[in-house]
Amino acid sequence: MIRNFAQLEKILQEDPVKRRVAVAPAQDLHTLQAVLQAASDGIIEPVLIGDAAKILEILAELSIRSEDLQIQDVTDPVDAVQAAADLARDGKVDCIMKGKIETGRLMKVLVNKERGIRQSDTMSILAFMESPHYHKVFAITDVGLLTYPDKQQKIDAIRNAVAAFHSLGIKRPKVAILAAVEKVNPKMPETVEANEIKEMGIDGCILEGPISLDLAMDEEAAKIKSYKSPVAGDADLLVVPDIVSGNIAAKALTVLGGGRTGGVVLGAMVPVLIVSRAATADDKYMSIVMGVLTGRRNGGR
């Protein structure tokens, strides 16, 4: 069991192999602050790809010595992302972090059939969460990439997430396929799909669904409703029906519930960090931690 993010940070700090994170384009103040803090803490080696002049200007503003950093001068933002993708394909970086570029332009490069790094038919975002009201770190998928996923996309997203949990040492994560109710209702398509996915089964995890959020996360609620399942009250992964419910759930946990989050895009050769401009410095830092940890399943360096 992983009880909190501090436990994950400690794992990285004690790892003698420091994973390389390519930041592209790197001329973004807030992104650089998070990356350089992670480097200062000894958990990553950053590779800064972008407009070198602008990067050096930001580093000077932060009083950071540029001589200690690897900087690749690529002025065009799209070319910078392509340079990061090339490094990932060559096994020279373990993670890619979005810098000063729109998400759509970045993803267009990464999913390109010839020079991209897509590995799965479905790329999905996994948001790891730490909540003061839950006994361990858990995750939600998908909170920002798959808008209205069909059944196969949900299956792919679960597989992506299960592989990420395996990289953290969780051998059989407990997966809750969420709905408003825990019974199959033909008028509620998400309950039908949840039941079909559960009956089909997915290797390497324990599936339950349809299941409501309270039963998945609150053991007492499951007892009151006489709901018996190994997932009840102990879920590791919450699978939401669509991007709306996922986005609301994640933001409610952080904005109102005092939670912390770190998100990562899975389904590529290496994890990709696409952090919202509105994300806190802590969210960005934890996204780096989660990206590097989940990237270790690809063999690392």
Image: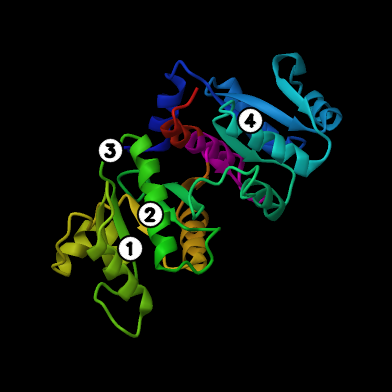
Would you say 105 lies left or right of 3 here?
right
Place of residue 299 in the rendered image (x, y in percent of width and height, measured from the top left): 44, 28
Vertical position of residue 255 compared to residue 129: above or below: below
Residue bearing the label numbered 2: 158
Image quadrant containing the N terminus? top left
User: Which stretch did the figure color magenta?
Assistant: 269-291
Q: Is residue 289 magenta?
A: yes
Vertical position of residue 11 compared to residue 67: above or below: below
Q: In the rendering, which numbered label is found on residue 177?
A: 1
Q: Quadrant of residue 91?
A: top right
Which label's residue is closer to the chain start, 1 or 3? 3
Characterize the local packing of mark 4: few (<14), some (14-19) or many (20 or more) Cα atoms within 10 angstroms: some
Residue bearing the label numbered 4: 87
Residue bearing the label numbered 3: 1
Visible residue check, residue 112: yes
Q: Helix, strand or loop at disc 3?
A: loop
The amino acid sitting under disc 4 is Leu
Would you say 194 lies left or right of 13 here?
left
Which label's residue is closer to the chain start, 2 or 4? 4
How far apart are labels 4 and 3 at the CA level? 33 Å
Vertical position of residue 213 compared to residue 62: above or below: below
Q: Helix, strand or loop at disc 4?
A: helix
